Image (cartoon, rainbow, N blue to C red):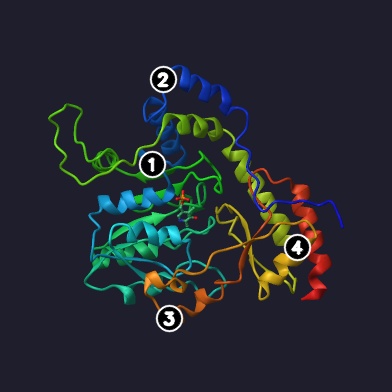
Amino acid sequence: MNETKINWWNIDVGEDAVPSIAAAIANGHISQGPITAEFEAALAKLLGVPYTVCTTSGTMALSLSLLAMGVGPGDEVIMPDRTWVASANAALLLGAKVRLVDVLDGGLPIMDTSKIAATITPATKVIMPVHLNGRGVDMEGVLKIAKQYGLEVVEDACPSLGSQQKGRPVGTFARFGCFSLGMAKVLGTGQGGVVACHNENDWKLLSRIRNQGLSGTSMDERHDVRGSNFKFTDLQAALGLAQITSLKKRFEHQKKIHAIYAQNLQNTASLQFIPVDIAGGEIPLRAEGYCKERDRFIAEMGQRGVAVAPQSLNLSSYPFIGANKKEYPFAQRYSQTMLTLPSGPDQPLANVEKTVEIIHSIDHLF
Ligand SMILES: *Cc1c(COP(=O)(O)O)cnc(C)c1O
């Protein structure tokens, strides 16, 4: 057949990181230390917040935030039906219960904030809006409801670093905002996550929980909050710092990929492209669409050398969530249908153009 081989994701952390990691090792900066602090300061600057706290993953950034809010067994955390299972697992790990909200009725897989109030019970403690793939949940709406009912808010902005809403980065509207530093995100440190926060007390609280609840540095210090080992490492921080300067270029590249798909996939029968509001300040992480016949689409593309990745099911599909998927009809449209087209900060634009060409060539089969 043909020689095309296009991966669905492409990120290159770059050779730049090698000298910084070698220097970290030479200086004995291996576990969490000064390079982590430097990386946290760089992330805070990028997000326009006074503090960030790095941890082992985006999922753990969410659990850490929920722990800091005192979430435990019996408490309920509200989140959208359509999200990656990590959002739910972060709450379930603490013994909390997940309550779901449908997505918008407007063709976007994003939480409908007008449906949050009906989900609130006396056990509700936290609202967790999820900014999926750079698309911001209406934060004004979320914060208004939270204030009205006296609830906490943590933003799952794991796949949305750099994306803005009304001129402000998503993940910086609520008390805590979490981002992933995993390799399928825009800034990858192997594994990793970060929490953005707005005041010294919260920063100290997160830092203590991250380090077994320790409140000082002496041997008789008190462990007066429940904690664990959520620490980051300087080796990861060195890898992250080396990429900070490439972020702007990566964001621009992702917008270019989005523009090629958006322009060329307007009238396709095989696939419906799901746009991101770039004019409004959003930055897409991946290129996404949904298909009625997803498996057949993926197979046809695969035969032509293009890897298309299926996306996960909605949370209500999983028995351990204990929800009825019929209650979330708009989210249903995206379960078993969504996929990721070849994208990523280092995906050559030629691959994107080739993918478009191949989609057009198979479109008559659908
Ligand atoms: C990636 C992601 C996470 C989890 O991040 P990890 O670093 O992989 O733990 C959580 N929520 C959403 C929406 C994500 O996309």
- Disc 4 and disc 2: Cα gap in Å? 48 Å
Q: Earlier in the sequence, mark 3 or mark 2?
A: 2
Residue 214's x, y, as percent? 21, 36
Q: Earlier in the sequence, mark 1 or mark 2?
A: 2
Residue at disc 1, secondary structure: strand
Q: Earlier in the sequence, mark 4 or mark 1?
A: 1
Residue 42's x, y, as percent? 45, 33
Residue 25 showing in the rendered view? yes
Mark 4 against mark 3, which lies toward the viewer?
A: 4
Q: Amino acid at mark 4?
A: Met
Residue farthest toward the right in the current orientation of the protein: 1
**Mark seen at residue 301:** 4
Residue 175 showing in the rendered view? no
- For the point 82% across and 60% down, which residue is it? 357
- Disc 1 and disc 2: Cα gap in Å? 20 Å
- Disc 3 and disc 1: Cα gap in Å? 35 Å
Residue 365's x, y, as percent? 80, 75
* Residue 131 to residue 29: above or below: below
Q: Amino acid at mark 1?
A: Thr
Asked if the residues shown at circle 4 and circle 3 are in contact, with their CB atoms under 8 angstroms apart, the answer is: no
- Disc 4 and disc 1: Cα gap in Å? 37 Å
**Mark seen at residue 55:** 1
**Mark seen at residue 12:** none
Q: Amino acid at mark 3?
A: Glu
Respond yes or no on whether mark 2 lies under 8 Å from ligand 1.
Answer: no
Dot 2 crowding, Cα within 10 Å, few <14, some 14–19, many 20+ = few
